[in-house]
Amino acid sequence: MEGGNQSKGSEFLLLGMSESPEQQRILFWMFLSMYLVTVVGNVLIILAISSDSRLHTPMYFFLANLSFTDLFFVTNTIPKMLVNLQSQNKAIAYAGCLTQLYFLVSLVALDNLILAVMAYDRYVAICHPLHYVTAMSPGLCILLLSLCWVFSVLYGLIHTLLMTRVTFCGSRKIHYLFCEMYVLLRLACSNIHVNHTVLVATGCFIFLIPLGFMITSYTRIVRAILRIPSATGKYKAFSTCASHLAVVSLFYGTLGMVYLQPLHTYSMKDSVATVMYAVVTPMMNPFIYSLRNKDMHGALGRLLQGKAFWKLT
């Protein structure tokens, strides 16, 4: 496995954050707990929104899709991570590594684009409330979500196909939790200039442009809120977008810790930041969106009461 070029039959070794058996046991139970909390939380969000007609609005439509994306995102990485922590065989096939990379890259992009669309939804709701129903029609919501999926799928395909051109020699040991873009590029022994150039160019389009759009949207939202005469009105308007702001801050904060640095400085210490955006952020999103949201509280209460009723009958 060492000393040769990559081939379809080659493998990588996902050694994780620690090779100590004691630490691996701690990590296993920690990641298992986080995965279960993430799955339960996001599934409850999806079920609550789909079962309550009062939540069939654009904001909750996009929130349900964000929860679905987060659910898919953690399922792409954590189960394999848990297997590796419990197993002596930590190998992942070359094809399996590229598959994991494709979904990781695509779903991060999809998360980001859905957050940008949700910012536009809040902008229309607060700055143009009289036109909200017509401006955010069901047809437009489906179109915006479809574009999010198309761009994220293309983004993932571009980088995965470019990765197939990369040659790996020497050690295939990855001191990381999963097959991640920067980690694989650091292992390459061929010229990765094209990969890096395309990564920067597409990253600006997929991440920086939506971020700029969100900043512009919230600048206008803040101005509109400040023009509201009553303190109660200001609080009510701000509370409708506070959860989204918290999620955006968490998402971009953790993502920036990993990727806003030169490739040659990327090291093991960045695995902690990767855990933040790959595991902690999807786990926290359901809590952030339901913590101070009375509509979501009510929907979750009715959903759980309904399940309890069916168990009793």
Image: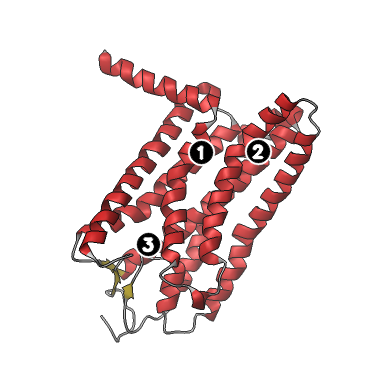
308 or 235: nearer the eye? 235
Asked if the residues shown at circle 1 and circle 2 are in contact, with their CB atoms under 8 angstroms apart, the answer is no
User: Image height check: is 230 above or below 256?
Assistant: above
Q: Earlier in the sequence, mark 3 or mark 2?
A: 3
Mark sitting on residue 251: none
* Element carrying mark 3: helix
User: Image height check: is 306 above or below 31?
Assistant: above
295 or 24: nearer the eye? 24
Residue to which mark 1 is pinned? 288
Residue at the image point whose x is 25% and y is 60% from the top = 24
Report crowding for label 2: few under 14, some 14 to 19, many 20 or more residues within 10 A (C-alpha).
Answer: many
Residue 307 position in % (x across, y down): 33, 21
Q: Which quarter of the rendering shows the C terminus?
A: top left
Q: Marks 1/2: CA distance? A: 18 Å
User: Image height check: is 61 above or below 116?
Assistant: above
**Badge 2 amino acid:** Asp
Residue 13 position in % (x across, y down): 28, 71
**Badge 1 amino acid:** Ile
Report crowding for label 1: few under 14, some 14 to 19, many 20 or more residues within 10 A (C-alpha).
Answer: some
User: Image height check: is 128 above or below 246?
Assistant: above
Residue 283 position in % (x across, y down): 42, 44
Q: Marks 1/3: CA distance? A: 30 Å
Extreme-left residue of the structure: 88
**Badge 3 amino acid:** Thr
Q: Quadrant of residue 160?
A: bottom left
25 or 35: nearer the eye? 25
Residue to which mark 3 is pinned? 99
Extreme-top residue of the structure: 313
Residue to which mark 2 is pinned? 121
11 or 141: nearer the eye? 11
Residue at the image point whose x is 54% and y is 50% from the top = 250
